[in-house]
Amino acid sequence: MYVSEQEVRAVLTYEKLIPAIRQALIDYSAGRVNQPPRMILRADNAEGYRNGWFGVMPVVAGDVMGVKTVTFYAGNDELGLHTHMAIVELLNRATGEPLAVMDGRLITEMRTAAVSAAAFSGIAPLHFYSPPTSLGIIGSGVQARAHIEALKHVWPEMDEIRISSRNAANARRLAGETNGRAVSTEEAAATDVVLVVTTSPVPVLKGCWLKANALVIAVGASGASLRELDDEAMLSSYVIAEGRSCVERESGDVLLSGAKVKAEIGEILANPGAADLPRDRRIVFKTVGMAIEDVTAARLVWQSRQAASGD
């Protein structure tokens, strides 16, 4: 069975995906997920940032197994193409039978935003004395848009959105579509919650721009030599990882700054009462993407299609 992006879009919703991702993150931190390190090969198709990469991400979890193959080509922006493209294969764990092969671009988009939404819902009540109200976004692409949609499901108090981008026209367009404001990077950074979703290989967020107790959700810059946050932003913050080993292996923000991961989000979600998160210090939630998230989303798509067909 092949499931197209259009078919994925018809059945995958944040209402179902966010709680499923939340449980997947808990299971990962509890050791119930068999997920080896992502393997990445350079495409060697071009020089510099146009040099794409090809990743393979397998995982065994629950009643399924799966593998995502994903490509990232930063230069695709100039060609009018998506920078990320992917395929997810889902298999029955009990028998090894292939269940479905589905387009993974939208799955990647939505599961990434769902991870941030699940993390926000776990961190914010433990970090802020009162619910935060302002969101600043650095970046104006696919993930910026997806995160606004996903965060609205867990953050009803959000009433201000500031958007900054190297492409001012894109920032104005997204702001107009989401009832936000296009602003400078410094203004976007001076909010309660700062989302960083760029493809920049060098820091775009400075710690000196941040509030003393800001929550930073750092999504871009997946790669040991890439970073979006400067040393001050990282070293002045309590760092929470999507997956400790993944972030410590693949995040330039962590590796190049020397910052230490203090906790995994799954640990906090599983037992918030035991979490000792600072209220008067910045928090950085760093995510690099994990196969368990893709397979969790793919399983939801497959289940929805099975239910619709009566199988």
Image (tube, helix red, strand yellow):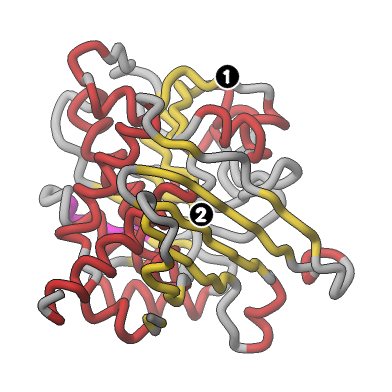
- Up/down of 107 relative to 220, above or below: below
Residue at 46% in and 56% down: 66
Q: Is residue 1 left or right of residue 300?
A: right
Say the numbered circle drawn on residue 260.
1
Magenta stretch encompasses residue 286: no
Q: Are marks 1 and 2 in contact (CB under 8 Å)?
A: no
Residue 192 seen anywhere in this rendered image of the structure: no
Q: Position of residue 143 (x, y in %)?
A: 43, 64
Which circle, 1 or 2, is nearer the viewer? 1
Highlighted range, magenta: 158-162
Image coordinates of residue 302 in percent, x first then y, are 28, 69
Q: Which mark is residue 185?
A: 2
Residue at point 15% right, 59% down?
A: 15
- Residue 265 x/y as whole percent: 36, 30
Residue 18, above or below 309: above
Determine the residue positioned at 33% across, 30% down: 266
